[in-house]
Image (cartoon, rainbow, N blue to C red):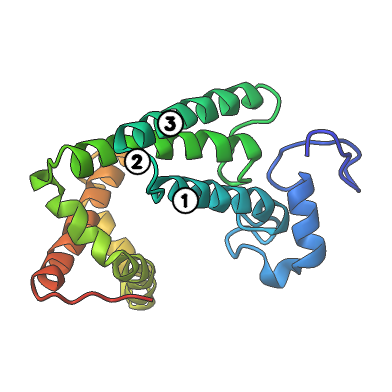
Amino acid sequence: MTFIPVPGVGYPNLEKETNLAAWIDRGILTEAHTWASSKTWDPEGILSTLPAVGTCLFGILVGVWMRRKDVDNATKVAWLFTAGIAAIILGLLWDLQFPINKALWTSPYVLYAGGLASIGLALCYWIIDVQGYRKFTTPFVVYGVNAITVFFLAGLMPRVLNLIQVTKPDGTKTGLLVRFYETCYTPFFSPINASLVWAVTYVLGFYVLLYFMYKKNIIIKV
């Protein structure tokens, strides 16, 4: 993406609508199948899928390592932590030439994000599974056992609520969820803090539902 000239543009670049990934997506997926919010590029497009496979393989390798029976826990944690640090360093070095970019799912992003995840997993494994400190984990378990449920509902709920159109004081119409946000959050907080408070409300609201499911031993799997 930083070496191959983009047809119709004439030079390699990483701009949203003129980079090589966007050009490939428009040519193969066409406007009908690219991201609805842009129609000119797709954050889950064809070229970005290749490094995304790398992220998947990163996780598989970590899983295989953690499942080994011939390695003690201290060694597992030490090597996982070392691999995480190495991946972060490599990602930051590669970023000097090819930026860490999630929308494009660039190769240095794979290394950087995978490194951070590996370090996080190593710390959690050592504290929770090896040392046995588990009392603080309940909220995370509540979310974790029904992760697919909240993932599905978090995407479905805004779409359904915004299908319900309400009239604003100026006579224009907007979605119910948008109106709720504009009424209960934006008048009382700065834009960035309103977004933060809304996100926290969202998480806590779903936690109530998931906690009820957890207590009733209702676990939805795919």
Q: Secondary structure at mark 1?
A: helix
Where residue 150 sits, quadrant-wise, is: bottom left
Point out the image quarter for the N terminus: top right
Compared to 200, does 115 lie above or below? above
Mark 3 neighbour class, 10 Å CA radius: few under 14, some 14 to 19, many 20 or more: some
Please tell me which residue is depicted at 65% across the width and 26% down the height of the picture: 94
The residue where tag 1 is placed is 64
- For image coordinates 47% across by 51% down, the residue present is 64
Label 3 belongs to which residue?
79
User: At which x and y percent is residue 114?
Assistant: 49, 40
Residues 203 and 112: in front is: 112
Q: Residue, x 31% and y 32% (percent of image)?
A: 74
In depth, the one of 69 and 96 nearer the eye is 69
Mark seen at residue 121: 2
Distance between the alpha carbons at the discs numbered 3 and 1 = 13 Å
Task: Out of 76 and 19, give the one closest to the viewer.
Answer: 76
Horizontal relation, residue 115 to residue 106: left or right: left
Residue 134 lies, in percent from the top left, at 12, 46
Q: Quadrant of residue 14?
A: top right
- Relative to residue 163, is residue 48 drawn left or right? right
